[in-house]
């Protein structure tokens, strides 16, 4: 079945996620691993998405719990923007607008294909409260429709111990810019 891990892959990913969870307890105070694992075991399609996050270098980890929806929230917690998701423009429209030197993909397309969402500015800022991320790279973030309508897109990074949100043409792409995702389980 497509978008489903084998039992061996599932076990291997759960073990990796558990080790990361235990190593980074500051990211998820008051969250118990057994409850996270129960959700993971009951969500094969979400496990596939987490594996995609892992495979592309995102190092997903639990960063919160939504009591209203009874969901655990995972973000990409790699130190730099995930390596397997760089050199891409913002969205499909931007990709199609490039006449030459097109990147292979776009952040929005890749995220949709992985079953995850790009971080919003608010989510990006909350991630940065858990550590120092994107000190050498940058990450596309969800862009408001008014900015996107004018052919722009937003990205963020951390420099000088400050979180910066910038703009660029949505069709631009750089070797040091990728995107970070979120997934609710």
Image (spheres, rainbow, N blue to C red):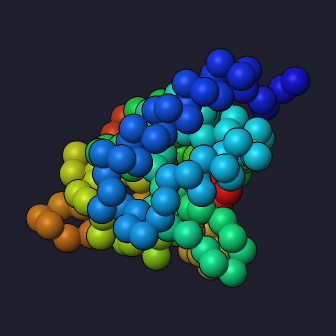
Residue with the most extreme left position: 160
Residue 92 higher or lower than 29, as above or below: above
Q: Give the left or right position of residue 5, taking residue 129 as reference.
A: right
Residue 79 at least partly seen: yes
For the point 56% across and 35% down, the residue is 14
Q: Nearer the viewer, residue 106 or 99?
A: 106
For the point 56% across and 51% down, the residue is 34
Quadrant location of the C terminus in the rendered image: bottom right
How far from the left and from the top, in percent, is residue 46?
Answer: 71, 45
How far from the left and from the top, in percent, is residue 23?
Answer: 30, 45
Query: Residue 41 is drawn in which quadrant?
Result: top right
Residue with the most extreme right position: 1
Residue 92 at least partly seen: no
Residue 144 higher or lower than 132, as above or below: below
For the point 33% across and 57% down, the residue is 25
How far from the left and from the top, in percent, is residue 53?
Answer: 55, 39
Residue with the most extreme front position: 34
Residue 81 higher or lower than 146, as above or below: above
For the point 65% across and 59% down, the residue is 184
Q: Give the left or right position of residue 6, taking residue 164 as reference.
A: right
Q: Nearer the viewer, residue 128 or 138?
A: 128
Q: How many marks?
A: 0
Q: Nearer the viewer, residue 181 or 159?
A: 181
How far from the left and from the top, in percent, is residue 127?
Answer: 38, 64
Q: Nearer the viewer, residue 73 or 137?
A: 73
Quadrant location of the N terminus in the rendered image: top right
């Amino acid at each position: 079945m497509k978008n489903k891990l084998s039992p061996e892959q599932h076990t291997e990913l759960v073990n990796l996620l558990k080790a990361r969870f235990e190593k980074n307890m500051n990211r998820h105070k008051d969250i118990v691993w057994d409850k996270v694992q129960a959700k993971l075991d009951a969500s094969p399609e979400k496990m596939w998405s987490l594996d995609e996050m892992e495979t592309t270098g995102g190092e997903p980890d639990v960063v919160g719990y939504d009591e209203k929806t009874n969901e655990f929230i995972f973000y990409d917690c790699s130190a730099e923007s995930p390596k397997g998701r760089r050199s891409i423009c913002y969205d499909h429209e931007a990709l199609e607008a490039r006449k030459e030197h097109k990147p292979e993909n776009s952040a929005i397309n890749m995220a949709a294909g992985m079953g995850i969402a790009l971080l919003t500015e608010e989510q990006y800022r909350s991630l940065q409260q858990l550590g120092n991320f994107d000190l050498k790279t940058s990450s596309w973030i969800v862009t408001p429709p008014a900015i996107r309508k004018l052919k722009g897109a937003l990205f963020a990074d951390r420099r000088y111990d400050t979180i910066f949100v910038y703009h660029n043409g949505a069709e631009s792409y750089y070797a040091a810019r990728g995107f970070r995702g979120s997934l609710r389980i």
